[in-house]
Amino acid sequence: MIKGLAPLEFSVGTTFAVSFLLCGFLEYMTSYVLEKRFHARWWDYSQKPMNLHGRVWIGNLILFGLGGVVIVDLINPLLLRLSEHMSFPLREIMALSLSVVFIADYVMSHFVLKLVKTSVELSEADDTEAISKEVRHIRRSFIERNESLRAWRRSGQRQRGCGRKRKNMLPRCGKRLRKTLNPQEA
């Protein structure tokens, strides 16, 4: 199954170079696509020496190369040996679980990035630092609201009538939820 990759074994130097180049290309393209799609720069290396358009920087590329060597030459052989001792159904369950986590992460990231895109478009800030400050504020607000929602669920208010499918209960529950999430508006 995984043994089909064996003919592609490289020396440490080749592994470093391939990791360096592939991760550098991926970082550059990710920065470019995120900037074009969401109209914001997520990182900017323009103040660092030896950068390419502020999107990639030699320091991180060296770390990517070293990380690739560690993963390919140290971690991957251990994981392959470990997977040989697992049953096929267990490997399937692990793969499915990881897929669910990755999909959930993608959906959540996309949702948050849409919020950020909307606020950046509405922002009057014109430099990266000001936009970054606004993005951090949005992130904190999102986390606080998410924690408030969890607290509301744990508080038992759902069991006292909220969440039932009766039409007359919905406005009361929505008002209670709004009050929990934004106490200053209540």
Image (cartoon, grey):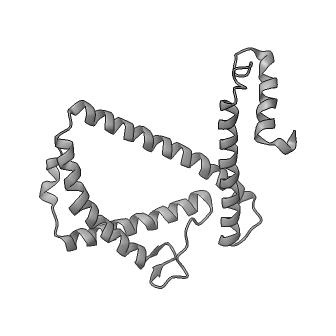
On screen, residue 144 versus residue 55, left or right, reads right
On screen, residue 131 versus residue 69, left or right, reads right
Residue 53 seen in the figure? yes
Q: Residue furthest bottom?
A: 49
Asked if 41 appears above or below 117 in the picture, the reply is below
Residue 21 seen in the figure? no
Q: Residue at x 45, y 68 (%)?
A: 28
State the quadrant of the C terminus: top right
The location of residue 75, given as percent across then percent down, is 25, 57
Q: Residue furthest front?
A: 155
State the quadrant of the N terminus: top left
The location of residue 168, given as percent across then percent down, is 81, 16
Where is residue 34, by image quadrant? bottom right
Q: Residue at x 30, y 67 (%)?
A: 19
Nearest the viewer among 28 and 36 is 28
The location of residue 95, given as percent across then percent down, is 32, 39
Where is residue 177, by image quadrant? top right
Q: Residue at x 69, y 26 (%)?
A: 156
Query: How many numbered badges does the structure rendering display?
Result: 0
